[in-house]
Each structure stands twice: as C-alpha cells, then as structure tokens.
Image: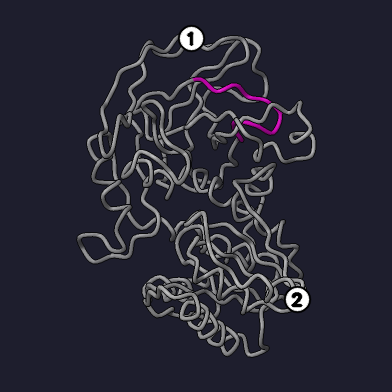
Amino acid sequence: MGSQGPGEVKASVLHGVKDLKIEHRPLGQPEHLEVQIAVQATGLCGSDLHYFNHYRNGDIIVQEPITLGHESSGIITAIGSGVTNVQVGDKVALEVGLPCKECELCKEGRGHCKRGLTTRRSTVTSEQYLEVWKPREHADLERLPDNVSLELGAILEPLSVAIHASRRASLKEGNTVLIFGAGAVGLLCAAMCKVHGAKKVIIADIQEDRVDFAVKNKFADVRIVVPMRRYQAIDEKLSFAKEVAESVKSASTTGEVDAVFECTGVESCLQAAIYSTRPGGRIMLIGMGNPIQTLPISAAAHREIDLVGVFRYANTYEEAIKIISSGNPLLPDLTKLITQRYKGFESIPAAFATAGKVKDDDGNLVLKVFVDTKTL
C-alpha cells in the first residue's frame, strides 16, 4: 500500500564555481517500486569541495547544474504500492551508485568501475524531501538498526570506501600498515585496519593536529608529521621520499610495512609509499590527486610490490552496518570524525567554506562537516 509524498522538493543546486541556488522542484507521488526519503544528515566530501570550488573534479567536468553531496541518510516518508522491504518511518542510508547488474563488470562485482555508471547524487538538498529512490537488491538504500544514528548512517558511504580498500589490501591479522593522509577517508581506513587486527597502524600527514587526533582517538598507534617541502627536480623528490620512508621504518620498529593506504593523491606520498613497503606488500591507491606522477617503478617491480587501484566501493553497505552496529571494541568512535555541524539551507555556503579549511574560525580541527536538514 502506497502513501503520498509532497508536491515539491527544495534543493540546493550548484550552477557554477561557488554559485549555489535554492530551487523548488516538483515531486509527484512515488510509483509502484519507488520510495521518497526526507534527507536529514549529509556529510560533505572532498569531491563535493572540488565541484563547489572548481565546478569539476579532476578530469570530470560538470556539464549541467548539480546537487552536491552523496553521504546521506534520512527517513522514508512515502512508498509505492509495490514496495514491501521498507516502510514509512524507517531510517535508511543512501547509496548513490546504480550498477545495472546485467553487464559483465557488474556480474564480476565491479559495476562501480564501468564507464557511464549511473548515480543519484543524494546531496544537501531538502528540508522536506529528496527525490525518488528505487529500492533494488543491494542497491540504493539500507535500513539502519535502532542503535545506528542518522549521522552514522551517512558515514556508511565513506566507510564503504575504507571497507573496499581493506578488501583489496588482503590484510592479515598482525600486519603493520601505513596510512598517508589523516583526513576522514584516511582515518576510516585506519579504523578498518584496526578492525582487521592490524598489529600497528602508522598514520602520516603534513598536519600535526590531524595525526595527533588519530592517535588520541585510537584510530592509529603511531603518528608521523611529514615535512612540508616542495621540490622540482626528480632526484630531489625521490631523496625526500626516501627520507620519509626512513621515518616510517623507524616508527614501525620492524622495518618496512605490509600495506600502505595512500589517501592523498600526492606524488611524494606515493613515492614514499613504495620505499616504505616490504617485498610482496601492497599499496592501495585511494587518493585522487595529480593524474600524472613520476614514480620509482623499478623499486616496486623488483620487490614485487603491488600497486592496487581503489575506486569507490561495491557491495559494502551490509558489512558497514554490521561493523558500525556491532559494538566491536577495536572500532574507534566514528562520530568523533564529525567536527562541525550546520543546520538548514541558509548554512550550506558556510558549511562548504568550513569544509575547505584545516581549522574553523574558532581554531577547531576540521575533519568532516555535516549539514542537518531535519524539519523542526
């Protein structure tokens, strides 16, 4: 049995560089297999910031106005007559990737990698309703248990990246791992390493406050502050990378690490990752930075170090919910990643401004900025 939704959706739409406009769009009743969701919690991601500040993200250039945000959760407010797996009032997390589930890549579990993947950008959109979502098996939305908040539900999306990366890393209990980048994704990767029984998690970043946060809140065991240096000549770059790698080896106490999660996309970090990894180890390429980089590739090839690409995620939400709701003592408190909270449409520009800073106007560390669009 279906239920009716409102006639209009309110959306914050990006029309150009830092050009956000609030729009009102028509919204009909949900069709047979559709649901409508009141988005109530949305986290701002690095890709959102790229689109907001540049109207592009790397090689992806925006072709038409876009609603930003893809880390969201909310409450189901209306369902179509054929929907039986969820009901009005359920808390759900939203997954924006829509694999076709028919092509060879989808059948291999790599639908997230195919060119032309369809997405629904959940976005910082509505104080009332988002757009329609069509529940399908393992796609679009996941019901949240009672002990999982809407904020944690929104964190499932970046946590899924970390879960996918940890799967690709083939981690073993007792491994020593290195995380380059102590932003939200790096910290979530560190958390997943903890859950998988890593003996030691080392985290490195140019921002001392971030690595201090990681160790203080038990995301990592050891911190490394990477010196802020920029070199032009390749021999100088590689010499610096080797210097950073020596710091990693000293921090590990056992020499080279078993795996590296490179979450920055910075050339010098990937260079240092190669020099830091043991023979037969793996480096996860997670950060999206400079698309063309100069690497000491022979240093990787001669020691059979695998460079493993990580793009988005696939089939992770069920595991993510189990991890978040299990009370696993190895899992750090993920709510601590939310360092700033904004409420309502009027606050969205300020939220984006804060998300692009290392510290907010009060001097507090910025990791993950959330926008609350619950109605009063």
Position of 236 with respect to 195 (left or right) is: left
Q: Quadrant of the N terminus?
A: top right
Q: Amino acid at mark 2?
A: His
Give residue 100's quadrant in the image: top right
In the drawing, what numbered circle is on residue 29? 1
Q: Are marks 2 and 1 in contact (CB under 8 Å)?
A: no
Magenta stretch in the rendered image:
132-142
Please tell me which residue lies in front, 229 or 327: 229
| Rendered location of residue 16, percent (x, y) | 29, 33
Q: Quadrant of the C terminus?
A: top left
Residue that appears at 37% across and 72% down = 207
Q: CA distance from mark 2 to mark 1?
A: 60 Å
Give neighbour class at mark 1: few <14, some 14-19, many 20+ (Cα, 10 Å): some
Residue 92 versus residue 50 in the image, above or below: above
Of badges 2 and 1, the one in the foreground is 2
- Asked if the stretch drawn in magenta spans residue 135, the answer is yes
- Judged by its main secondary structure, the magenta piece is loop
Upstream in the sequence, badge 2 or badge 1?
1
Disc 2 target residue: 302
Please tell me which residue lies in front, 276 or 345: 276
Residue 251 versus residue 76 in the image, above or below: below
Residue that appears at 48% across and 64% down = 266
| Rendered location of residue 338, percent (x, y) | 40, 55
